[in-house]
Image (spheres, helix red, strand yellow):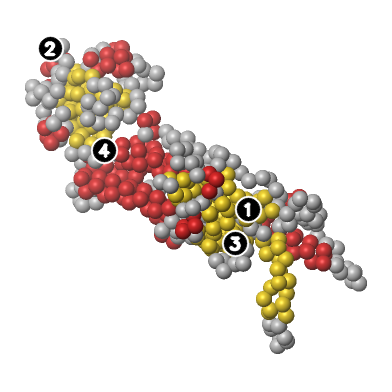
């Protein structure tokens, strides 16, 4: 990025001054660097490939030749290379043919650093080539005149080490990655820095796949629970609404950005991170994973990491399982049991108070009376604990993905103690029970 010290000071123009080429060179350089300085601070990561095409025929033998290129370099220089150019833009990587190691060869677009205060010294390469430009007309009707032009001295540089970059005398950015496979050089799935996420780009397709998966999951939950159909006046529907809200809250901004195809990759990445934050409600402990730093020179690594997290969270939303919380009233936890819930396994999750161990939670449940409201008073007098409850481990035998800190139990559906349509109550009559009283109890319902 251009720094303030790189910007030439303003020229003190005055009447009668003798003009030299340096006056105009310094003025042009100052204008360019002022623009890139402002752009770099107003829009982070304002560099990347706009259009890029490789000659894949020559690539097979190890010659990386750029047929067409349009890009903005990290220092703000706009560069362009056409297929009909007299100076080929290429680099030979045939020496890296390694059928065993399959070395990853990164191809960098390079140009010599700009020298504002001096001419190139011995062994240094000038930033521009002086070329004879095409004749241009006089817009006021005069004759055409050929004007000498300065053309950026573009080159390609190959590296093989991780995070290896070209020498510092160059301004550079990676544009492609190749490897030797099946006796031929081929391009990998590497995505270079870019200025926009289009629908048909690799980043755009990744975002579109995430949107599709999230929408499919949300629509399934809505249809299964009756949300939006007028038949959703159940606690199952309330639980589904909570899950759907976590799924879709971050979806509209992401869809809007992907639809227009002109948004910067970092902006789209932030929307993906927002979506990941909402989906972290399905993570153990409901805390999102700490993602790696965004690297604009390799945006797919950051996109891939957040994609993997999002898809893991989507997979945690069990299409056949909903979580319905018990309410705590009059010293006991309770929930009205719908008849359909009692036809299969009745699995609950108990989250103990802070710092409580699994053993303490299990002991609290063991001392509880578990029964429907109409049975509770009788059982209390008989010192009977009601329906049996069996502690389950977190290996998946419960058939649900219990969050971290939640101990799953199976409550045996015994008609002597559990009545459909009544409030199932979990009560610990022991006075010490208040010490280890759970923070919450949740019913896991399979549709």
**Number of other residues with Cα within 10 Å of mark 3, as a class: few under 14, some 14 to 19, many 20 or more:** some
Given this view, does label 1 or label 2 mark the residue nearer the observer?
1
Which callout, 2 or 3, points at the residue further toward the start of the chain? 3
Task: Give coordinates of residue 277: x percent, y percent.
Answer: 42, 41
Residue 182 in sight from this viewpoint? yes
Question: SS for tag 2?
Answer: helix
Pointer 1: residues within 10 angstroms few (<14), some, or many (20+)? many
Q: Are marks 3 and 4 in contact (CB under 8 Å)?
A: no
* Residue designated by label 3: 88
Marks 2 and 3, how far apart at CA: 94 Å
Give the CA separation, mark 1 to mark 2.
86 Å
Q: CA distance from mark 1 to mark 4?
A: 50 Å
**Which percent across, then down, holds residue 63?**
53, 54
Vertical relation: 141 (above or below) 329? below
The residue that label 4 is drawn on is: 318
Residue beneath label 2, please? 382
Q: Earlier in the sequence, mark 4 or mark 2?
A: 4
Splitting the image into 4 quarters, where does residue 403 fall? Answer: top left
Q: Residue at x 21, y 39 (%)?
A: 320
Mark number displayed over residue 110:
1
């Amino acid at each position: 990025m251009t720094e303030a010290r790189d910007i030439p000071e303003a020229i003190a123009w005055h009447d009668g001054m003798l003009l030299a080429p340096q006056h105009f060179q310094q003025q042009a350089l100052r204008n360019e660097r002022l623009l890139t300085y402002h752009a770099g601070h107003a829009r982070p990561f304002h560099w990347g490939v706009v259009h890029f095409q490789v000659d894949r025929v020559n690539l097979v033998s190890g010659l990386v030749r750029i047929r067409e290129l349009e890009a903005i370099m990290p220092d703000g220089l706009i560069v362009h290379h056409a297929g009909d150019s007299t100076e080929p833009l290429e680099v030979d990587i045939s020496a890296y043919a390694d059928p065993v190691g399959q070395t990853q060869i990164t191809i960098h677009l390079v140009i010599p650093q700009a020298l504002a205060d001096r001419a190139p010294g011995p062994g240094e390469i000038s930033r521009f080539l002086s070329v004879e430009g095409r004749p241009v007309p006089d817009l006021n009707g005069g004759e055409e005149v050929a004007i000498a032009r300065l053309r950026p001295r573009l080159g390609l540089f190959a590296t093989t080490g991780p995070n290896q970059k070209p020498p510092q005398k160059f301004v550079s950015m990676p544009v492609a990655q190749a490897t030797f496979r099946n006796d031929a050089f081929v391009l990998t799935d590497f995505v270079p820095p870019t200025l926009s996420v289009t629908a048909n780009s690799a980043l755009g397709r990744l975002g579109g796949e995430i949107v599709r998966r999230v929408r499919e999951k949300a629509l399934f939950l809505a249809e299964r629970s009756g949300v939006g159909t007028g038949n959703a006046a159940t606690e199952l529907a309330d639980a589904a609404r909570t899950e759907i809200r976590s799924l879709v809250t971050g979806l509209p901004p992401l869809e809007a950005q992907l639809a227009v195809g002109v948004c910067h990759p970092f902006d789209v990445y932030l929307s993906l991170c927002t979506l990941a934050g909402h989906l972290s409600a399905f993570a153990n402990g409901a805390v999102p994973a700490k993602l790696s730093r965004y690297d604009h020179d390799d945006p797919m690594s950051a996109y891939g990491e957040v994609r993997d997290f999002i898809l893991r969270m989507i997979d945690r939303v069990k299409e056949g399982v909903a979580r319905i919380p018990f309410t705590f009233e009059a010293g006991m936890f309770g929930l009205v049991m719908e008849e359909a819930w009692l036809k299969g396994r009745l699995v609950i999750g108990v989250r103990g108070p802070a710092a409580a161990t699994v053993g303490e939670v299990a002991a609290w449940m063991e001392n509880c009376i578990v029964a429907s409201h109409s049975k509770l008073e009788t059982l209390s007098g008989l010192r009977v604990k009601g329906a049996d409850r069996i502690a389950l481990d977190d290996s998946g035998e419960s058939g649900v993905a219990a969050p971290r800190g939640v101990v799953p139990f199976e409550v045996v559906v015994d008609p002597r103690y559990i009545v459909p349509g009544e409030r199932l109550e979990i009560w610990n009559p022991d006075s010490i029970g208040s010490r280890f009283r759970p923070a919450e109890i949740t019913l896991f319902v399979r549709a």
